[in-house]
Image (tube, grey):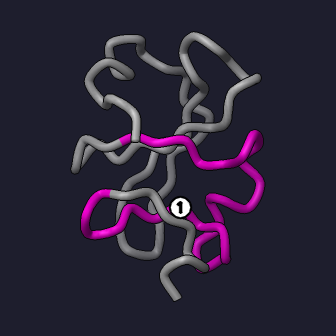
């Protein structure tokens, strides 16, 4: 898990905004210091959580209903849909 407040202080570049199948609004952003050599970061502003996605490209992580869809679990951990099945 990343420090949400510290990350937001750096105003990361937003690759994409989407709403997942749970209705969570997710921002996929570039790491503000490491750029595209770091994994894509997912942010859920409603619960003030951010974490690395495990992916270097957006690809399937924003496809609603897909196995790699980004979901923040009830305890705030970033999960992929297949991990919750």
Q: Is residue 51 magenta?
A: yes
Instruction: Determine the secondary structure under disc 1.
Output: strand
Q: Which residue range is magenta in the image? A: 50-76
Task: Please tell me which residue is depicted at 38% across the width and 74% down the height of the picture.
Answer: 22
Q: Is the residue 45 above or below the residue 74 in the image?
A: above
Number of on-image labels: 1
| 66 vs 73, nearest the viewer | 73
Task: Give the x, y percent position of residue 45.
Answer: 29, 42
Q: Is the residue 32 above or below the residue 22 in the image?
A: above
Task: Give the x, y percent position of residue 82.
Answer: 60, 79
Q: Is residue 14 magenta?
A: no
Q: Quadrant of residue 39?
A: top right
Task: Please tell me which residue is depicted at 35% across the width and 68% down the height of the picture.
Answer: 73
Q: Is the residue 50 above or below the residue 80 in the image?
A: above
| 17 vs 57, nearest the viewer | 57
Quadrant that contains the N terminus:
top left
Task: Please tell me which residue is depicted at 59% across the width and 48% down the height of the picture.
Answer: 53
Q: Residue furthest front?
A: 1
Q: Which residue is mark 1?
A: 70
Main SS, magenta residues:
loop
Task: Give the x, y percent position of residue 63.
Answer: 65, 67
Task: Please tell me which residue is depicted at 55% across the width and 32% down the height of the picture.
Answer: 29
């Amino acid at each position: 898990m990343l420090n949400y407040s510290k990350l937001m202080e750096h105003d990361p570049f937003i690759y994409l905004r989407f709403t997942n199948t749970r209705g969570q609004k997710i921002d996929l952003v570039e790491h503000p210091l490491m750029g595209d050599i770091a994994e894509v970061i997912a942010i859920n502003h409603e619960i003030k959580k951010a974490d690395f996605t495990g992916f270097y490209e957006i690809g399937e992580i924003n496809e609603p209903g897909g196995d790699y869809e980004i979901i923040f679990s009830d305890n705030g951990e970033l999960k992929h849909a297949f991990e919750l099945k």
